[in-house]
Image: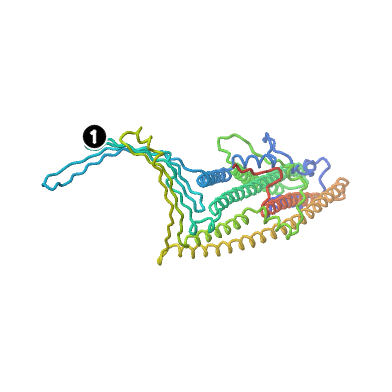
Amino acid sequence: MTLLSQFSIGLVAFCAISLFAAAPTSKFESLLKGADLFGVPKDVKKVMRLGELYEAISVKGVKIRQGREDYNSALDAYRTKYNTLNFPVPALSFGLNSSKATYSNLDGTFSNTSSTGLNAGLALSGSTGWGLSYSFGLPSITQGVDTYGNLSSSINLGLTNLSFSLLKGSIFALGRNQKNQADIGMNSAKYTLKTTVLSSIKDAESAYYDVLLKQIRVQVLEQAMASAQALLSDVKEMVAAGESDRLSVLKTELQIAQGETDLLAARIDLTNSRQTLRELIALRIDENLDIYPDPNELKANRTPPELDATRLMERAKATRPAYLAALGTKRAAELAVQSAFSDILPSLDVQFRYSYNGTAASLADAQTQLFQTPSSYVGFSFSYPLFNDPAQASYRQAKFGLHKAEVQVEEAHNAMMKEINQSIIGVDMGQRRLKMAEMSRQLSEKKLQAEFEKFKVGESAIRNITDYQKEVNDARINEISARVAYFTALSSLRTSIGDLPEGVSLSFAQ
């Protein structure tokens, strides 16, 4: 039994003992018009529109803030990967060493030797990710002194290593595989963040409308309490005039007590809903900010998109982050198979070195000799494991991973189709329910107005008025509920497609 129905029972109880229609000056008569369902409570200083809700949830929402941190972490890893593949890594080295050895002589004596050395150098090295690796010495300097005080100095400068793969790990087997994988990982982070934003906005909208709906219920119950109290005043006057008995007073007082309990429960429910909304936008308890959704948002005429499942599916394939993420996972699995296949190929590398070396007692003499003694090296290396190669197992696992990713794409496609179809049905039904609720509310208001005109001339009883008043209140609540359900269905459809609300954009730092 609804709260409005419980209130109506009290009214019917009074009407059952009424012998005549209420007088035109009845206190109850002035309350028949009903509450302003779109009014803002007196204690609310500022209302929050939907645009302000979107802004608040994007700035303070916990899930979105966490999602942005995850995205920033992925972005940092993406930049690091690209920098590693595109730019060499400079490394400064410095070392100090001391060694000592004891040797046995032919005459049975022992000799001790020792040396102390110092080395420093600057090197550039890197790898392109498709089979080319390199290392430059710029330069490397070594100085030492032996047991007898002899000095030795050497300087090395040049291309210390250049290796190019022809099979395993080569550009012919991998292409730009590692960069593609980095791109996919970055896109996956974007899709994850967008999914979080869509989910957070949908939850915030649901809480927003829930607060409005429960506030309107409280307003209706407050109006019902006012009507019950006015009715009690009328009954007491009729008892004093001998037109009713004390039992009617007791019944009306009982109904007021029940109404107070129901109103208290509704207010507690409203407080909980408001707190849920506060938590979604991460307002601290000590932030003295009263949040109240703008009731005018319920008056908006929102036209849904064209409810064509085929066109919406095509649109969702380009915008729905969960589906795009599944496609990215499949592409990553394909690249993993490509990398695993490269690993099972024989290793065939071309190696090249070209450097200068100067060695002398002093560092100055070593520098003089540096470019007089160049050295070069060109060679090939080949290796291939005959059996028990773990790369073979990795290749099989990569193919299993690809099959799994293909299934996940199919599941994501089916889930997308299911959600879109359900959302289309929800929007269509929401439109129909809202239209019927609006017609029902208009009809109920007209019936109440006509019955009240008859009541004023003594052609109707107050019981009919109260019945029609209850019908109007129920119709108003049903219309608000239908409007909220319709707006919620639109939000679900928008989310299932992967669209953000109008006026909301999502930027990705690069």
Residue 253 seen in this snapshot? no
Q: Residues within 10 Å of mark 1 (few under 14, many from 20)?
A: few
Q: Residue furthest top?
A: 364
Identify whether 177 is placed above or below 113: below
Identify whether 288 is placed above or below 12: above
Of residue 167 and residue 296, the one placed in the foreground of this image is 167
Image location (x, y in percent) of residue 323: 63, 57
Residue 436 seen in this snapshot? yes
Q: Residue at x 57, y 49 (%)?
A: 186
Image location (x, y in percent) of residue 140: 38, 39
Along the horizontal axis of the image, is 484 left or right of 164?
right
Image location (x, y in percent) of residue 195: 61, 50
**Which kind of residue does numbered mark 1 sit on?**
Gly
- Quadrant where the image shows the N terminus: bottom right
Of residue 70 and residue 476, the one placed in the foreground of this image is 70
Identify whether 97 is placed above or below 332: above
Along the horizontal axis of the image, is 413 left or right of 332?
right
Q: Secondary structure at mark 1?
A: loop
Of residue 417 and residue 267, the one placed in the foreground of this image is 417
Q: Residue furthest bottom?
A: 387
- Quadrant where the image shows the C terminus: top right
Along the horizontal axis of the image, is 34 left or right of 74?
right
Image location (x, y in percent) of residue 389: 42, 64
Q: Give the residue number, with chain letter if any, for mark 1.
A: 149
Of residue 416 and residue 169, the one placed in the foreground of this image is 169
Identify whether 295 is placed above or below 343: above
Colour style of the rendered protein structure: rainbow
